[in-house]
Image: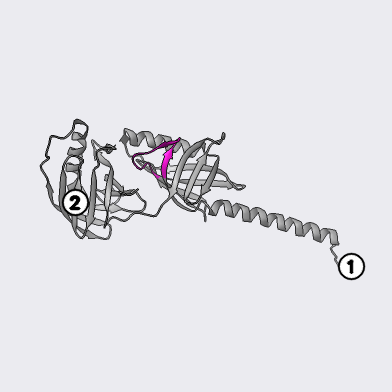
Amino acid sequence: MRPFRLSLSAILVAFVAAVALSAIVTNASWAGSSLAGRWSIVSLNGGKLATPAGDITFETGDRTINGATACNFFRGTFETSGETDLAIHVGTMTRRGCSGPAAESERAFLRAMAEARAFRIDGDRLELTGTDSRSLVELLRSPDAALEGQMQKIVSYYHNGGLYSAGPDTGPSISFNGGRIEGTTGCRGFTAHYKRDGTRLEVSDVVYAEPQAPCAEDTQDQDAAIVAALPRITAFDTNRNLIRLLDKPDGAAMFWITPAGQ
């Protein structure tokens, strides 16, 4: 049997192909890995937001996404090519009702993800752009929130079977610290006590201050809804920067809150 020999030209062709393939794999890996982590929305279609509108987490290991709009949670997949090309595919999503600015933000975020064709990263800031390079959404890299130890903004509250956005200028807030709850409905203050066992909560001794003046008309429903929802809290979820205070584990959200600094 004649010995098998590779010519010098064949060796060079194989080497060049291997280098090219390595570059493609490395480049694709870079494009995906730069997106890794959770990003919170700061702007939609060029407009700054008064309240959080959601977030998205890119899991680069299996090229999946998960996140939250202002109303619901979603899961899906993403694809990258080259250095900046991007396609996002939202698959499953919860169907909790919401209205007002929260519903508008949800529609805008879902549309932005569907229309995204490329991305740009500058430090801790991510921008998704469309086919005409128009900015669709800007996001900021952010860590998960913690329930205790700081003041939290009440972003939305449960009312009439759905989530309603808190008035941007009314300032409803809540804090959990050392077994004590303090906050405001945007019209009057409140205090309570709580016990925590893992992700379960027991809220008791709720006391509402008398308002110094009648609630403004645009905060009356908000005040009444927060008063009704607070004693119903029995659990919480802190998987993202939007903490959910729930009526039961995996139940309906009574409040969505986020750190006051975000």
Mark seen at residue 182? 2
SS under mark 1: loop
Quadrant of the rendered image containing residue 176:
bottom left
In whole angstroms, how far apart are the C-alphas of marks 2 and 1? 87 Å
Is residue 201 found left or right of 107 in the rendered image? left
Mark seen at residue 108? none
Q: Is residue 217 magenta?
A: no
Magenta residues, start to end: 41-54
Point out the residue furthest to the top here.
217
Query: Which residue appears at 50% of the width and 46% of the height?
Result: 77
Residue 54 % position (x, y): 38, 43
Is residue 7 found left or right of 141 in the rendered image? right
Along the line of sight, which residue is nearer the eye, 76 or 128? 128
Callout in the foreground (2, 1): 2
SS under mark 2: strand
Along the line of sight, which residue is nearer the eye, 262 or 70? 262
* Amino acid type of the residue tagged 2 in the rendering: Glu
Q: Determine whether 43 is above or below 181 in the image.
A: above
Residue 72 % position (x, y): 36, 42
Quadrant of the rendered image containing residue 167:
top left
Res 85 seen here: yes
Q: Which residue is mark 1?
A: 2
